[in-house]
Image (spheres, rainbow, N blue to C red):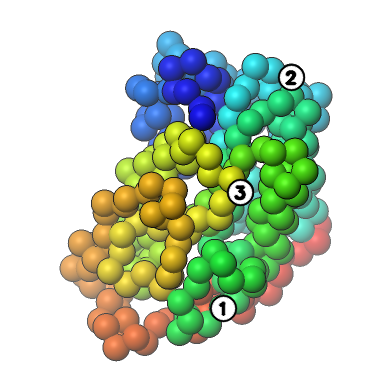
Amino acid sequence: MINPQTDRVLITGAAGAIGSTLRRGLRDHWRHLRLTDIRPVPDLADNEEFVVADITDRPAVESMMRDVRAVVHLAGIVGSYTLEDLFRVNARGLFDVLEAARLAGVERIIFASSNHAFGCYPITEKVSPALPPRPDGLYGVFKVWGETMLRNYYDRHGIRSVSLRIGTFRPQPIDQRSLATWLSPADAVQLVDVALRHPDPGCMVVNGYSNNTRLKTVDPNWATLGYKPNDNAEDYRAALRAQGVDVDAPDRDVWEWPEHGGSFPRTPEKPPR
């Protein structure tokens, strides 16, 4: 079991949207946080230390693993990128972080996977972590690869892990799809907190959503992990309607996109360079 009072937790990608949210939500309870990013992290608390580094810098990654008991790996490229950069950070950088963690004796890894690991499933089919992955692009492929590596590290080396297939992380839902896929900041903090505290998660994959009325998932492993999300995208239905979002079609099980991955499955892959 990871002890929030005594054990050091490393958070990669700590300057990003999720990393910044986790810092605010965890630091009152987790007394030893080590943060890393290529960008500065402002307003460090007394129990936070910051290491500026690129996760593709293997010596730097190995150094920051010193005395770390658990890693929350958030760092990665999303949005605008070339395939070369995607591979450098989300594949090679992922390998370096996980392997450096193994060599340092890290006991638990929380991995920011993505719902794009199963984005090619039809929206009419309720998905579960028990189903085979169906990534909707190379971004999702590398998330599946990370989950597979963690399975190998558990089977061969006993490293416990929780892969979080994170949905639409925003302060509020942003579109029709996020009525099903939204993950609120407060629920994201709870999700990572319980993943760190669980006495023995084994090698678990969990769907990372809030408690949305229109969830398109089944058996997301929430009960096993002890995750009890509180927020619901439905509470923002009127606000989305005011923005011109069609929030009524899902009542008839009609969705803007035919797959779980939204526009991703039908979007051309990024340029190589």
> Residue shown at 71%/69% (left/top)?
269
Q: Is residue 30 left or right of residue 246?
A: right
Closer to us: 68 or 137: 68
Three-letter amino acid code at the position of disc 3: Cys
Residue that label 2 marks: 63
Q: Amino acid at mark 2?
A: Ser
Assess disc 1: are there few (<14), some (14-19) or many (≥20) residues with their C-alpha within 10 Å of its C-alpha.
Answer: many
**Among the two numbered marks 3 and 1 on one chain, the one whose residue lies closer to the N terminus:** 1
Which residue is at 69% across, 23% downward? Answer: 65
The amino acid type, in three-letter code, at marker 1 is Tyr
Q: Residue at image x 63%, y 31%?
A: 107
Which residue in the protein does label 3 denote? 203
Q: Residues within 10 Å of mark 2 (few under 14, many from 20)?
A: few
The residue most toward the top is: 46
> Which residue in the structure is indicated by mark 1?
121
Per the image, label 1 sits on a secondary structure element best described as loop
Q: Earlier in the sequence, mark 2 or mark 3?
A: 2
Q: CA distance from mark 2 to mark 3?
A: 26 Å
**Residue 92 figure quarter:** top right
Q: Is residue 183 visible?
A: no
Residue 4 image position (x, y, % from top left)? 44, 23
- Mark 3 or 1: in front is 3
Say if 28 sits above or below 82 in the image.
above
